[in-house]
Image: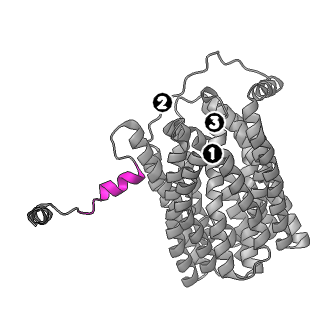
Amino acid sequence: MRGSGKTDAARVSAPRRRFAPPQVLGRWMPLGQDVQSQNIRRVLIDGIGVGIAAAAAPYLPVFLTRLGADNFAIGLLTSMPALAGLIFAVPLGQFLARQKNIVPWYSRSRFLVILCYTLTGLVPFFVTNQIVLAILLIWALATIPQTIVNLGFTIVMGEVAGPEGRLYLMSRRWSSLGITTAIVVVFAGLALDRLPFPFNYQIVFIVLSLGGIVSFAFSSRINVPDQKPPSTPQVKKSLRERLQDWSDKLRAEKKFMTVIGSQFVYRFGLAFAVPLFPLYYVRVLNASDEAIGLIATVQGAVLMVAYYVWARVTKRRGVRFALLITTLAVAFYPIILSFTQQIPLVILLSGIAATFAAGIDLVFFDMVVASYPPQEAATFVGMQQETVYLAAFIAPFIATMLATAFGIPFALVVAGLIRLFGVGMFVRFAKE
């Protein structure tokens, strides 16, 4: 009994544990003052800013569709960034390789891209005819800074994370971005359904573009080492000589070639479905803006957990396991969707697909960063992005042409079959 009394007294006198936000926050991001901890925090908060602006992305093709844009215009919206990347990725990669530090180019370019949502919202105030054309021109101009963002992102994130921290950093960044987008999309959808058209879209685009300020404030402060200058002096070469140099570099890096080759077909299938989803929601399902927003919300909410889960799964079971499971599951998504007419089921399917898509993002990123020589990151990322842009440019045009000729559900089935072919290539790659 005395022992029990002492225990009771100890319990009374012991201070109660209080909820400590820093401890909870520390589980998600490092709170130290060293350079890497600060960089990781800035990357994650930058992701939140991007997530706010990204909530506008699913509504951009819907806005154009409601303005009367045809299938070709929606396909063009998807393909323009890819065309610019196809033309400029390698030269811009070489340009970035000559810069002392890539971070300023990355942060400013990201801000310019997000600013285009503000410009999109302003267009109907100043343009009465050819509104769709004016908006397409804005996003055509955005393709140059977007290409720089895509190149700089892989390099900057790789520098911040280091060889051992890629899954840790990207799972948390993309989770933060996804949950932010999920929450903001809910309110965006409510605003769109309650305000008159097109004022509703204008307000949503302008307000959400404020996320670009948050992104720039933190991404511009990421601190990575300056790039080493080229070991050999730069000699002006002809186009033929430059092409020969690129060819020699690619042949010397067989692992890099295998990675980008195996990813190309699957990325083609991913890009194939991009313009089909909003067309299917609006023209086949007759979904409201609120329902479309709910689809994006569910996807974003799922991503918050899914990135964390797949980071752990990949670490425990390996890249091969995660690669095959995730790509196979996402391959069936557009096929099943094409036979689905009930919006609640579509929302459920989108959540399931997002669960596996998170794993694809992590695995693809890790595979690419691990496959090229770090001292030539900008050049090799430029080459890798060329294959991404090639798929993203060609696939949407073919998809919208098939949708016009044979219907949107048929085109969705084709997207799934292309992805399944890509899975077969991954199986072969995994055996090597």
| Residue to which mark 1 is pinned | 318
| Residue to which mark 2 is pinned | 225
Rendered location of residue 264, percent (x, y): 78, 47
Of circles 3 and 2, the one toward us is: 3
Tell me where the magenta segment starts and ends, as one range.
18-29
Q: In this image, 406 relative to 11: left or right?
A: right
The CA span between labels 1 and 2 is 30 Å
The CA span between labels 3 and 1 is 14 Å
Q: Secondary structure at mark 2?
A: loop
Of circles 1 and 2, the one toward us is: 1
In front of the other: 86 or 380: 380
Q: Earlier in the sequence, mark 1 or mark 2?
A: 2
Type of colouring:
one colour
Q: Earlier in the sequence, mark 3 or mark 2?
A: 2
Amino acid type, residue under disc 3 in the picture: Ala
* Residue 127 visible within the image: no
Rendered location of residue 223, percent (x, y): 44, 37
**Residue positioned 48% across, 61% down in the render:** 210
Q: Looking at the rendered structure, which numbered label has been put on residue 78? A: none
Of circles 3 and 1, the one toward us is: 1
Amino acid type, residue under disc 2 in the picture: Pro
